[in-house]
Amino acid sequence: MNARAHRFAATAALALLGATCAAGSCVRAQALDGTYTKAKAEGAFVLYVGGPTAPWEAMARRFEERYGGIKVSVTGGFSNVLDKKIDQQIADHKLEADAAIFQTLQDFARWKAQGQLLPFKPAGFDAIDASFKDKDGAYCGVMVIAMPYMYNTAHVAPADVPNSAPDFLKAEFRGRMVTPYPADDDATLWLFHNVVRKYGWDYMDMYMASKPNFIQGHLGQQRSISSGQNWVTFDSIFNITEPEKKAGKPVESHFSTVDATPIWPLTGAIFKSAPHANAAKLFLGWLVEPAQQAASGTWSVRGDVPPPAGFAPIFSYKVANDYIGFLTGEDLPALRKRFEAYTGPVVNAGGVR
């Protein structure tokens, strides 16, 4: 066969492949089918997830409907509690968790360094922003968490919505501000760190003089704003606020044009010694598919998925996006201790459901 015939044959083969497998969908489908077969033989997998538990249980049920024969067990709670359980399981050589999705990104960096994570690059890995994934596939983001301001629309008029951290010090918000305890929640710690880095530690003296309220975790914090118990926070989680808003609660998010809004990837990984590694791969691969990313209620880690309706692409806002650098580069115990001196220890425990 001459070179021209070779080219013709190659072109015809590509055309046939394109006709039967548009955009590589058949190759991907075959890969998923192979993983599904192995995952179905495993029959189940265990997911540990930080944050509100109920949305993940609903997501697990959708996955089970899509991939019959695989039972998902969700263990939810606070990331900084569940990570210690996993560490103990690893130490005891009795790993229960197949995969973890946490906000404590330093755990993933540490587990990778210890050789505890299974490298996995799901379909679409290249579309995930570099800042939201490990280049070797040890872990990757599954959704973008944005932390804009939040306010109760029944108590705060549009003209009075804070647009900077100093705006929260106004007299009308005295005793009506709320955040999680910064010494207890790493994302809140990062946010407060950014505030004092910009405005100085004197800001904390003025903030505390305004009688803010503290609660463990973002779910209880935001529900207190929905109920009108508190009115404002500079430390919300967008994809907790939006369901409250859709449920008819008088709440709204606001992206500051003065202070950078923290964003970070809620991140997932599979453990190298996972009892059900194939089922975990199938779940994480499903989770970063465009359809699931678009249905997440927040921004996708993928650049090819549009933002939530009514909002701009996340990088069009003024954002801070160095969360993992903060978690792995700062003296976190000393920073927690300094903030705890302002707030005191956790006495107002929140929930995760």
Image (cartoon, grey):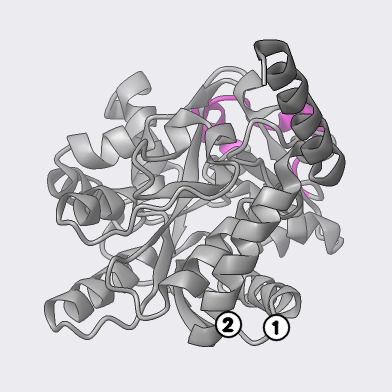
Q: Quadrant of residue 240?
A: bottom right
Nearest to the observer: residue 259 or residue 299 = 299
- Residue 216 lies, with reference to residue 45, above or below; the image says above
Q: Which residue is labeled 1 in the image?
A: 68
Q: Callout 2, which amino acid?
A: Lys
| Image point (67%, 21%), residue name | 1
| Image point (75%, 79%), residue name | 65
Q: Which residue is labeled 2 in the image?
A: 40
| Image point (72%, 37%), residue name | 305
Nearest to the observer: residue 38 or residue 238 = 38
* Residue 34 located left or right of residue 61: left
Q: Secondary structure at mark 2?
A: helix
Instruction: Count every numbered label the image shows and give the total.
Output: 2
Residue 329 visible to the viewer: yes
**Residue 187 at what x, y percent from top left?**
40, 47
Q: Which residues are magenta?
A: 155-171
* Residue 160 located left or right of residue 82: right
